């Protein structure tokens, strides 16, 4: 284990070597299958990481909000897809048009009303923003059912918008043994919608899918593009689902043991570190074994989480760490962790080599 | 219902009139029981709100981190208690000593080792930082058992630190029908520890307790001080626990309906608003009925939450809102929401009257 970093705690730390390996591995996986990679930048919100992804061959970025797109435009990124069914009012339309002057821009749509609103708000600029129709492949969040996609696409064409593709988020891949079926569902849903669109005269469509759990599964099939996000860092969820190993975890929260309890109330011995939900985030899926993991101790479990405390239990017989010890906590869902901090330390071989700004932190709109 | 605010969504909005009423009500509740009020500022992180609390009679603030204390010192607050068992290394000691020159400062301790580390790091300045010993009254997080408090206090005195009080956080008050018992536990734990300290010659002790659920319960008893936080805003948790009504909710997230699903997959009709976990936070207690509430519709439930989507179900027969509609979402745990945004809109009678900076956002260390 490297020596403790000389940083205050709790602090988000990124291991540059692991990050680079994760980026190269996913790029290679997409390349050999003939798929375009458009990583979801909501996971990292960091221009330096976006540039590494593009240098490794990514075609562009995916983002969730107009504000994220603006940050990456400022960083010189030239191709961005806002994978979200935006409801675009006048102020949002002005921002989209300003973006379209700086980069190649596409946005998501999932309703005839949303398409008409977008066209109305963009006015004479409607042709400058491409749209992709969102399809629900089983996650049941946003998106239309496959057979409804052509209706939205035709409405977009009638409203003067350019339809350049279809997309889905197979979010139902996030669970034990669910990823393979989600990848099949994704193929089927997109294939049905794509066939309808081609019958209606749409061509050169980008067919985009791929969560981190499903991104490496199966042949390209109908897909032309993947949009995984979490793969750059990994997290406790991906580890517990078997989509990454401990050696693939690039982000952790350096923390300090601040309190210990031994044999005081009939409960197992426990200790508290200073990384709570205000730095880890508090996502916890029903199947998760705890509120996060310790990087160096696979048997430890975070049994309770408050804003500034993570309470950790070790298996019976393992000694508690000393007060003041440094430990690295792996959050359950890394996308939330990044959105809680303004900067991250970058280390290589245990030595700090930089500080990156989380430039798109908090850009929710 | 007031007209939609002319702000982008999702955006955190504070109703000034409700906020002022909540501040006055808790101040009055403490005053009539002869208790000092030291509100926990981690809930709001906003200097303007801290000033309102002090103007209403608060004795000072509680914070969770040195960084929060620094922000409120910059804002001119003169009395701060860091209610956390800090592990103080050299850099942290310098920050504490700088703070102690600007305001009246106390910090939490819960171990002999922590006390010795604090004294060693503060060096000749040890007497300038007061300490309060944390007692576990049943939440089983940090804090020592009541009978152990005197040992920590004696170690602090031996190490040259000034012991000025005891504190506990009765966090086990956060559950249905648990608050009354937690208030009793708090009294008993603090009374036992206080008696031991007085027997050992400690005097003029501040005896501090009080979560928002328990803060209004019972007589002052052994307490001299309360530290509730959430009461300024209220949230869905407090509402579901019965500690505030819908009219007491001062903070909500203005959001837009971006997607609708009707009769498409056998599930109930649902819609999606653009407030997800990256603005609401994702705390969800086991007893919560959903991932948050809609301010104007007590029957709606947020049945799923992703980073930028909240999926809402209405009771059978209620019509879905139109795409583009504005709705106000009440987060489950408001302390996490505030920590996700850099500024909040302040409204009065539905009209925007200001924008406050969340000056201590992200100050985790």
Image: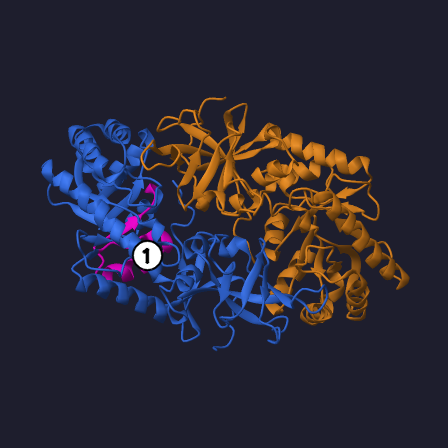
Chain colours: A orange, B blue
Q: Position of residue B73 (x, y in %)?
A: 28, 48
Q: Position of residue A283 (x, y in %)?
A: 53, 48
- A180 on left or right of A303: right
Residue B16 x, y percent position in the rendering: 36, 68
Is disc 1 surrounded by few (<14), some (14 to 19) or many (20+) residues within 10 Å? many
Occupied quadrant, residue A198: bottom right
What SS does tag 1 mark?
helix
For residue B38: magenta?
yes
Report in which chain the residue with disc 1 lies: B
Residue beneath disc 1: B179
- Relative to B44, is B137 on the left or the right? left
Quarter the C terminus of chain B occupies: top left
Q: What is the total number of numbered labels drawn onto the structure image?
A: 1
Tell me if residue B90 comes above or below residue A211 in the rendering. Answer: above
Measuring 82% from the left and 43% from the top, which residue is drawn there? Answer: A220
Task: State the residue at coordinates (49%, 70%).
Answer: B298
B250 sits to left or right of B170: right
Q: Is residue A303 left or right of residue A178?
A: left
- Given residues A328 and A139, the one toward you in this image is A139
Visible in this render: residue B198?
A: yes
Q: Nearer the viewer, residue A219 or A224?
A: A219
From the top left corner, tell me how far across and down residue A273 is, in percent. Answer: 40, 36
Q: Is residue B103 visible?
A: no
Q: Which residues are magenta?
A: B37-66
């Amino acid at each position: 284990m490297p020596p403790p970093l000389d940083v205050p705690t709790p602090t988000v730390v990124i291991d540059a070597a692991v990050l680079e390996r994760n980026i190269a591995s996913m790029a290679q996986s997409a390349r050999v299958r003939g798929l375009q990679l458009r990583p979801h930048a909501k996971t990292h919100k960091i221009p330096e990481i976006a540039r590494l992804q593009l240098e490794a061959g990514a075609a562009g970025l995916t983002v969730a909000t107009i504000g994220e797109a603006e940050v990456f435009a400022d960083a010189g990124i030239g191709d961005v897809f806002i994978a979200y069914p935006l409801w675009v009012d006048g102020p949002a339309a002005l921002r989209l048009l300003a973006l379209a002057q700086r980069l190649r821009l596409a946005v998501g749509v999932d309703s005839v009303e949303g398409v008409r609103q977008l066209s109305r708000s963009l006015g004479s600029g409607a042709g400058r923003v491409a749209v992709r129709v969102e399809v629900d492949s089983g996650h049941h969040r946003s998106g239309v059912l496959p057979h409804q996609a052509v209706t939205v696409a035709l409405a977009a064409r009638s409203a003067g918008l350019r339809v350049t593709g279809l997309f889905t988020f197979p979010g139902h891949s996030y669970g034990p043994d669910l990823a393979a079926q989600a990848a099949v569902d994704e193929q089927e849903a997109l294939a049905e919608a794509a066939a309808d669109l081609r019958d209606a005269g749409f061509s050169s469509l980008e067919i985009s899918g791929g969560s981190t759990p499903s991104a490496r599964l199966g042949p390209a099939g109908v897909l032309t593009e993947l949009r995984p996000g979490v793969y750059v860092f990994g997290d406790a969820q991906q580890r517990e689902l078997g989509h990454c190993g401990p050696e693939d975890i690039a982000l952790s929260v350096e923390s300090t043991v601040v309190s210990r309890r031994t044999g005081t109330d009939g409960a197992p011995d426990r200790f508290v570190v200073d990384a709570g939900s205000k730095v880890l985030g508090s996502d916890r899926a029903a199947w998760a074994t705890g509120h996060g993991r310790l990087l160096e101790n696979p048997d430890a479990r975070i049994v309770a989480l408050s804003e500034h405390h993570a309470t950790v239990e070790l298996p019976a017989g393992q000694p508690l760490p000393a007060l003041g010890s440094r430990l690295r906590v792996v959050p359950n869902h890394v996308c939330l962790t990044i959105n809680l901090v303004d900067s991250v330390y970058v280390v290589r071989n245990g030595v700090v080599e930089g500080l990156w700004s989380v430039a798109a932190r908090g850009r929710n709109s």
